[in-house]
C-alpha cells in the first residue's frame, strides 16, 4: 500500500513551533517494550539500542530519561520518533504524577529530538543550546524526510519542537527539592551540545559528548571535542549518563572515547603531513574496530570530517 506524506508546521502557542511528519493514519507498527532504570533517587534512564535508526526499533537508539523533583519533572532528550517520546511520557506517568515542566535537548540530532512533539500537550519549557533553533530549522526538514523514508509508519507524528528557552552559557532549573545545572558547550560533537548536572544525585547527563560502546561520532569539530573532554574531566560527578551506551562512573567513563579521538587526530594529522589523499587516509586510519559498536557505519565519516578540518592547518 502506498502512503501519502505531507509536512506542515503548526503553531501551538507563542514561542513554540512543532514540525512533524504525518504518515498515513492507521499505522500498524508497534513500539517494542520500553524499559526504565533508576540508577539514583529521582533519576530514571531509558537505554536506547546500539543500532542505527530503523522501522524495527522506531528510532529508539539514544539514551533518554528524566529527573523528578517535588514540583515537577525535567525530561532529558525524547527519542527518535513520536512513538518513543510517547512511550517515555507514559513511563513518566507510571513513576510520578507531578507535571513535566521542562524538556531538555542535549543537542539537535534526530534520535534525541524527534520525540519532542509527544510532550507538547504538557506545555513545558523546551530547552536547548542557543544554536539549537537555528540548527533544527536548517537541518530538520532533511532529517524528517530521511526519517519517513527509512522508518515508514513508525515515524508517524514524529517531529521537533523549537526551544522556548535557550542556553548560551549556564543556567539552572528548579524542580522543587533539586536544581539542575545546565551548561552549553563550544562546538564539539555538534555545535549544539548541552550537559545537565544533578547535584543531588551527582549525576551528569552528557548527551553525545559521551559515547560508551558506540563508536564516537564527530559532527562538529574534532579538536573542539577533545577540548571539551579536557574540561568535562574537571567536573565533579559520580555517575555519567552517555547519549549511547551504559551509565558508568565518572570520569573513567570517558577514557576510551578520548583515546579513540586522540588517535584519530594523530593519525589523520600524520597522513596529511605525509601528503596522503583522503582516499589513502580512509584506507589507512583505523582504531580498534573490535571495541566499538557501529564502527563501520561511522568511523570513515569521522576520518573524513577530521581530514576536512585539519587539511589546511599550518
Image (spheres, rainbow, N blue to C red):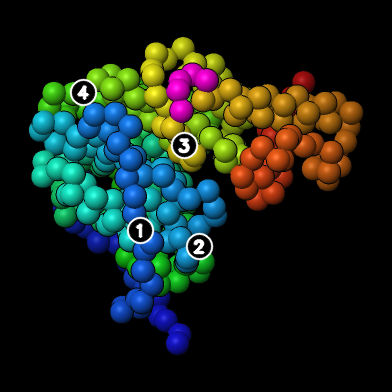
Q: Earlier in the sequence, mark 2 or mark 4?
A: 2
Task: Please tell me whether mark 1 sits on a helix, a strand or a loop.
Answer: loop
Residue 109 in the image, given as x and y percentages of width and height: 46, 46
Q: Are marks 4 and 1 in contact (CB under 8 Å)?
A: no
Q: Is residue 6 visible?
A: no
- In space, the residues marked 2 and 1 are separated at their CA atoms by 16 Å
Residue 90 in the image, given as x and y percentages of width and height: 22, 54
Left or right of 295 on screen, residue 31: left
Left or right of 224 on screen, residue 145: left
Q: Which residue is mark 3?
A: 246
* Mark 4 or 3: the one toward you: 3
Q: Earlier in the sequence, mark 1 or mark 3?
A: 1
Badge 3: few (under 14), some or many (20 or more) residues near its Cα, within 10 Å? some
Q: Is residue 93 magenta?
A: no
Find residue 54 and name its label.
Answer: 2
Find residue 179 and name its label.
Answer: 4
Q: Which of the pair 128/314 is nearer the observer?
A: 128
Q: Are marks 2 and 1 in contact (CB under 8 Å)?
A: no
Find residue 33 and name its label.
Answer: 1
Q: Earlier in the sequence, mark 4 or mark 1?
A: 1
From which residue to which does the magenta span run? 248-252
Q: Quadrant of the C terminus?
A: top right
Task: Please tell me whether mark 3 sits on a helix, a strand or a loop.
Answer: loop
Amino acid at each position: 500500500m502506498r502512503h501519502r506524506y505531507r509536512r506542515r508546521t503548526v503553531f501551538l502557542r507563542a514561542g513554540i513551533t512543532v514540525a512533524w511528519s504525518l504518515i498515513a493514519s492507521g499505522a500498524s507498527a508497534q513500539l517494542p517494550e520500553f524499559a526504565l532504570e533508576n540508577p539514583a533517587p529521582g533519576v530514571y534512564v531509558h537505554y536506547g539500542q546500539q543500532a542505527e535508526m530503523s522501522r524495527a526499533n522506531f528510532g529508539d537508539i539514544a539514551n533518554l530519561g528524566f529527573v523528578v523533583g517535588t514540583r515537577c519533572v525535567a525530561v532529558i532528550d525524547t527519542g527518535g520518533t513520536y512513538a518513543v517520546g510517547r512511550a517515555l511520557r507514559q513511563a513518566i506517568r507510571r513513576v510520578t504524577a507531578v507535571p513535566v515542566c521542562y524538556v531538555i535537548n542535549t543537542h539537535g540530532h534526530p534520535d534525541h529530538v524527534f520525540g519532542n512533539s509527544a510532550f507538547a500537550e504538557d506545555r513545558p519549557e523546551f530547552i536547548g543550546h542557543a544554536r539549537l533553533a537555528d540548527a533544527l530549522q536548517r537541518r530538520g526538514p532533511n532529517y524528517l524526510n530521511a526519517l519517513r523514508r527509512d522508518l515508514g509508519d513508525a515515524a508517524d507524528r514524529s517531529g521537533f519542537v523549537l526551544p522556548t528557552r535557550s542556553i548560551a552559557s549556564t543556567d539552572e532549573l528548579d524542580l522543587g527539592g533539586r536544581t539542575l545545572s545546565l551548561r552549553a558547550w563550544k562546538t564539539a560533537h555538534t555545535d549544539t551540545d548541552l550537559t545537565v548536572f544533578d547535584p543531588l544525585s551527582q549525576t551528569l547527563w552528557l548527551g553525545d559528548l559521551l559515547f560508551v560502546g558506540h563508536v564516537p561520532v564527530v559532527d562538529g569539530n574534532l579538536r573542539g571535542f577533545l577540548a571539551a573532554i579536557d574540561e568535562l574531566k574537571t567536573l565533579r560527578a559520580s555517575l555519567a549518563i552517555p547519549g549511547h551506551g551504559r551509565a558508568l562512573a565518572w570520569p573513567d567513563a570517558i577514557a576510551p572515547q578520548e583515546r579513540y579521538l586522540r588517535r584519530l587526530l594523530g593519525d589523520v594529522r600524520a597522513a596529511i603531513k605525509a601528503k596522503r589523499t583522503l582516499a589513502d587516509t580512509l584506507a589507512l586510519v583505523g582504531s580498534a574496530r573490535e571495541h566499538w559498536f557501529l564502527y563501520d557505519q561511522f568511523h570513515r565519516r569521522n576520518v573524513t570530517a577530521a581530514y576536512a578540518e585539519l587539511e589546511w592547518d599550518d
